[in-house]
Image (spheres, rainbow, N blue to C red):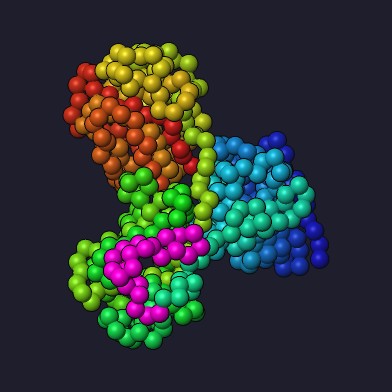
Amino acid sequence: MVQFVFDGTNLVDVFDASALGAADIGVFRDLGAGDTAIGGQGADRFALAAAGSAVAGGAGADMFFTVYDGTAAGARDTIEGGAGIDLLSITVNSSQVTDILKAELVRLQAYLTFGDVGAHFVSDILHVDMTGVETANIRLDGVLRSLSDIAPPNLTIGFESFALGSNHLLTADPAPLVENGYAFSGLGLFSTHVADTGHSLGATAGPAAGGSQFLAIYSQDAAFSRQDGADFNLLSLTVKADAVATLDAYNNGALVHSLDLTLDRQWHTLTLNWTNIDQVVVNYISNGQSNYVALDDIVVNSLVTARAPTVGFESFTLGSSHLLTADPSPLVENGYAFSGLGLFSTHVADTGHSLGATAGPAFGGSQFLAVYSQDATFGRQDGADFDLYSLAVKADAVATLDAYNNGVLVHTVNLALDRQWHTLNLNWTGIDQVVVNYISNGQSNYVALDEIFLG
């Protein structure tokens, strides 16, 4: 075994170790902005600096080392694991273990457990854009730990705690069914054992995987949520349907995810990774006495993404009436650029421009962004894709909020015309531009934005 060391410089470096054999180890240190490093056939090591390097492991059990810096913006290192069982190792100290980091580790854990490691895991918190890496750990205060040691483990609801027999209809006992702190309610719910061929379950009556029970929902909508009403993440579940139905997820009454169920009476495992929701509904579109939707092996996590807003417009020193008609350059905060002729940032006490009594910012701070009489857009300053988790908005115009990727409209939501702040939980992923789209406007019409959570 021979070890070859490649040290980065203050220039843009390109290191190609692809000719190294399976018994050789390439060690790449101090990789900085714009650097490229290519591993060989052995177990190579890459020390990253969250500065925008691009590394490819090649074959072998490669290791990629990064240090958590506590910020949610900046360059990402691009990692391609390649063949072999590769590892991402994240160095953290105890003072940095916040809910923000824990939530991101939950998301990473879900990607490694339920996702396709050939797909991209993109994180502005960990500063990585990663594919082909199969495992991860944490070096906490110098001690190696698993992800689950830092972030709460996932819970699986398999309905095995229900001692209900095969025909417990909630029409007779309407109290919700509870397991692991999650409550299931609906008029047609019941828990059933393996050998139940009635109620149209037929030959596929058995539970999804192991155990002896699953939950069947008959002829009525049903819902589940945390018993304490708090937000949660739905990572995956197994479902089979003999009804035309959707699986819908909500937050504060707003629909944030919806998925059509396959009507074929077969078990399907759905990898969802739906975050920051507070209710899931099995929504019947057509039904009948014998129609059902069956659920089993529901994987949830109680930790939600508790992060500070990426953009709150507090860095803008623009006063209360800085119109971009006078200065058309985009406004930039934390790497996100806002452009549009009617944009300006305003302080609390601005009752002009029809903002009226609701002129203050959404939550804390002293500024928000108002968009007047013109469409406006925002996106990453470097043009890369991003995720829009939520934002606060109020409108005195008929308008929509539209999200695009490569010029294709992928999401749209109508804004409530009531001059009140509303928090929209969107969880839009893989977008590159958001547009405030005026449908009708006038000199005094506006749309105001604040507290934008991005990733």
What residue is rendered at 48% in x and 65% in y? Answer: 179
Taking depth in this image into account, of 199 and 266 the one nearest to the observer is 199
Give left or right: position of 32 versus 367: right
Residue 1 horizontal/vertical position (percent): 81, 66
Query: Is 91 drawn above or below residue 72 in the view shown?
Result: below
What residue is rendered at 38% in x and 62% in y? Answer: 176
What residue is rendered at 38% in x and 54% in y? Answer: 279
Residue 5 horizontal/vertical position (percent): 78, 52
What residue is rendered at 60% in x and 37% in y? Answer: 71
Q: Quadrant of residue 4?
A: bottom right
Residue 391 visible here: yes
* SS majority, magenta: loop
| Count of numbered tags | 0
Residue 34 is one of the magenta-drawn residues: no
Residue placed farthest to the front in the image? 172
Taking depth in this image into account, of 18 and 344 the one nearest to the observer is 344
Residue stretch in magenta: 165-190
Residue 188 visible here: no
Give left or right: position of 288 versus 24: left
Residue 174 is one of the magenta-drawn residues: yes
Give left or right: position of 257 versus 95: left
Residue 392 horizontal/vertical position (percent): 38, 33
Q: Quadrant of residue 194?
A: bottom left
Taking depth in this image into account, of 404 and 109 the one nearest to the observer is 109
Residue 257 horizontal/vertical position (percent): 35, 53
Query: Is 151 drawn above or below residue 50 in the view shown?
Result: below
